Amino acid sequence: MLVENSRPHLFDIYNPQTSRFYDEMFATDQTVWEHYNTLLHRFNELSPAEIEARKQIVNVFFLNQGITFTVYGADEGVERIFPFDIVPRIVPASEWDIIERGLTQRITALNLFLFDLYHEQKILRDKVVPAELVLGSKHFRREFMGVNPPLGVYIHITGSDIIRDGHGNYLVLEDNLRCPSGVSYMLENRQAMKRAFPTLFSNYRVRPIENYPQELVSILQQIAPSNPDNPSIALLTPGIYNSAYFEHSFLARQMGIELVEGRDLIVNDNKVYTRTTRGLKRIDVIYRRVDDDFLDPLVFRSDSKLGTPGLINAYRSGNVALANAIGTGVADDKVIYSFVPQIIKYYLGEDPILPNVPTYLASDPQDLVYILENLDKLVVKAANESGGYGMLVGPHATQAQRDQFAVLLKADPRNYVAQPTIALSRHPAFANDTSFTGCHIDLRPYVLYGETVKIVPGGLTRVALTPGSLVVNSSQGGGSKDTWVLFD
Amino acid sequence: MLSRVAESMFWMSRYIERAENTARFLDVNFHLLLDLDKITEVDSRTYWEPLIMVTDDRERFLTLHTDFTAQAVSDFLVFNRQNPNSVFSCIALARENARSVIETIASEMWEQINRLYHFLNTADPTILQRDPYNFYRELKNGSHLFQGITDATFSRGEAWDFVQAGRYLERADNTSRLVDVKYHLLINPNKEEIDPIDNIQWMAVLKSCSALEAFRKVYLSRIEPETVLQYLVLDRQFPRTIYFCVAMLQEALWRISGSRRRDFSTNADRLVGKLEAELNYTTIDDIYQLGLHTWLEDLQKKLARIGDQVYQTYFSYHTFQDSEDVVLAPGSRSNALSSGNVKVSRAVWSQSDSSQQQQQQQQ
């Protein structure tokens, strides 16, 4: 058809601005990286309307499945789909190899660090990490000194956020050691892409990720302190009002384990049971998606109704395993983050394979001066916040916002770090219904740790769909896309 | 299964059934009045007020409206968010319960309940005046579709039995309320003959249970208070009669506990067995002897006690002090309620609060 042929290809009018940004797809403004060639041609065959139609198929799939998240503070019934972008991100085998080795190294070292902190504290005595930073952290749980988690593992499920800088180097932006969310989107995005672009998918040799639930459940089995042949495992959720409730129910269903709330559990003689219609049933392992503070009103927040009285004592007595262990938050604190390269060196004698983003500590008087003088160039983060809250993006902020942060920094320096504003790499996204836009992205692979470290080849690529925005969090207008890790 | 999951299955089912019955009452009333208008001068208020009495919400209604107009009553019973028994509230509660057991129910069940909720949530309230026929039909079909999907996709395990128990307990209660209110309104002791208007009204009562055609096959055209009553209370085959519902409730509860006749194991089983036997050997004359209203009120109390015992046996969250025997078998605890203090109207009419209050607290 003549009209069809005269239409410009969608990627012909895409402007990657490679002089300003690292583009995941385009090596220069005219040429794509080799592994994106097939994708380029396939998408160029489609009109915006055709792409929009495929996007709608995916959205209806998500809505009917109830793959939605609840927006905090919004009216009852406000549920949104986590926006999905249909241009997949492709990671070649050679790059994945770096990520996999880098994360394995990092998580191994962080786990040794946690074990040390809750036992001998050698690293503090050797002054590699300042003791006051650890002992003063609100996530350090001194009540768990000397407690031995099964296999010596504290961080069974982690999701470190990885970014690429302007030169395409992979860097770790933060470590999430407290049961990070999002893995259900990784799995569902893959399902959605297979539906929307079956041919394109089969043209690539994409490594499968569908075994994630099995890998997770086998790790949970490995850490069972009792009943090792057939442990009873439950996923503990805060309940249906939690924004990640869909993910909790999804994972419980995929793994075939019970989904429980705190009030379903009861502790007697330091053993944990579920209340069932046939009486009480012993539980051996709890994959908990509830923060430390809400697990047990007898030990942590006494006003919490989410928890189970006595749970912590059962854990301390070794009668139930928790994944992740308690007190892991001390190691994903944004201040401790800046010491991870030294932590890796200290425990493993190796240089980090994946570098950190340079970080200035407001608690260091010299750094503080530098931060205050350069607020317009830096990103300032509160040490313990997540989800993109408590953050100042200097270059995009108003003078009033910067002034406000200056006050906060001076008042509580221990609680803040600053990093140079990194021009996160960009990836074409079908963000405005008519054409492709370069949007900033990051990557969250999920690392499982039981008897060994296992990383399912893939992850959640989050994308800042608001033009120009650097914040990829779902609570702040971010979306996600499928991530294709290729075989060699 | 988890007590909380069992409770959610039970109440999900009850709330959907309640929503459907409310839609049925409204639908039939609306069409009844279309007929009556042509025959006689009627004050439509006398036909709308009883609907509020069916659900026992008179006081709440009067805090919001002054007059029992068609519009006020139907809006109160369908869309009003402050009325916990409105169709909207029931579907919203059913959906909350479904969401909390989303990994237990079939995903098709969840999708249907979700669709029904979105249908009500986005409906324009004026539809009750503009196109009530299609609106109520949509609601009833939505509920039937849910039950059909459940029937076709859900494993016949304990969870299924709790769904059945919830549905039939609710339906028995709803039918008894409908009969109670209509009978009260229609029986005029000074009147010997049944006039055509009464006849239309009794037909309407049957229709609201979808029972008119089935009734005719049994009694042909003898639509009289006695035959209608006999049918709706004691018929053994029609799935909305009180006897039928109680019998099904008994089956479901006995399957859950593994009870058999002469060998019940929980208090709920005992009470439902007793009620079934009573209904089984009751005649319409026995009921008249006691007075229909008194008899129905007593029936509702008994249903409420069964509901309460289901709660005590399976859902209530035992603490360790009283649970030594709970570990062994459900219902080995005796927890008899003195018959005097069951408040029929609401005591066991809505889900225990513990299920809802827990969750507001977020990380």
Image (spheres, coloured by chain):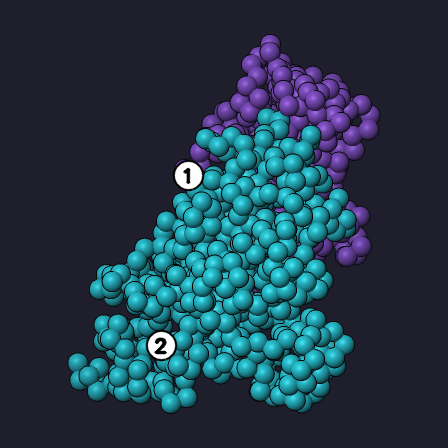
Chain colours: A cyan, B purple
Which of the labelled discs sits on residue A242, or is there none? none
Could you say which is closer to the camera, residue A380 or residue B139?
A: A380
Q: Residue at x 26, y 84 (%)?
A: A31
Could you say which is closer to the camera, residue A429 or residue B68?
A: A429
Q: Residue at x 30, y 58 (%)?
A: A207
User: Can residue A182 be seen at all in this image of the molecule?
Assistant: no
The kind of secondary structure element at disc 1 is: helix
Q: Does A139 appear above or below B222?
A: below
Disc 1 vs disc 2: Cβ atoms closer than 8 Å?
no
Where does residue A63 sit, x and y in percent of width and height? 46, 59
Quarter of the image where the C terminus of chain B is located: bottom right
Q: Does A450 appear above or below B72?
A: above
Image quadrant in which you'd find residue A418: bottom right
The kind of secondary structure element at disc 2 is: loop
Question: Which residue was labeled with disc 2?
Answer: A24
Where does residue A258 sit, x and y in percent of width and height? 53, 39
Image quadrant in which you'd find residue B307: top right
Decide if residue B319 is on the left or right side of residue B19: right
Q: Residue at x 50, y 62 (%)?
A: A344
Question: Which residue type does callout 1 highlight?
Answer: Thr
Chain designation of label 2: A
Decide if residue A472 is on the left or right side of residue A212: right
Q: Farthest top residue?
A: B262
Q: Does A82 appear above or below A366?
A: above
How many marks the image carries: the answer is: 2
Q: Does B110 appear above or below A47?
A: above
Question: Which residue type does callout 2 highlight?
Answer: Glu
Question: Which residue was labeled with disc 1?
Answer: B153
Where does residue B19 sit, x and y in percent of width and height? 60, 45
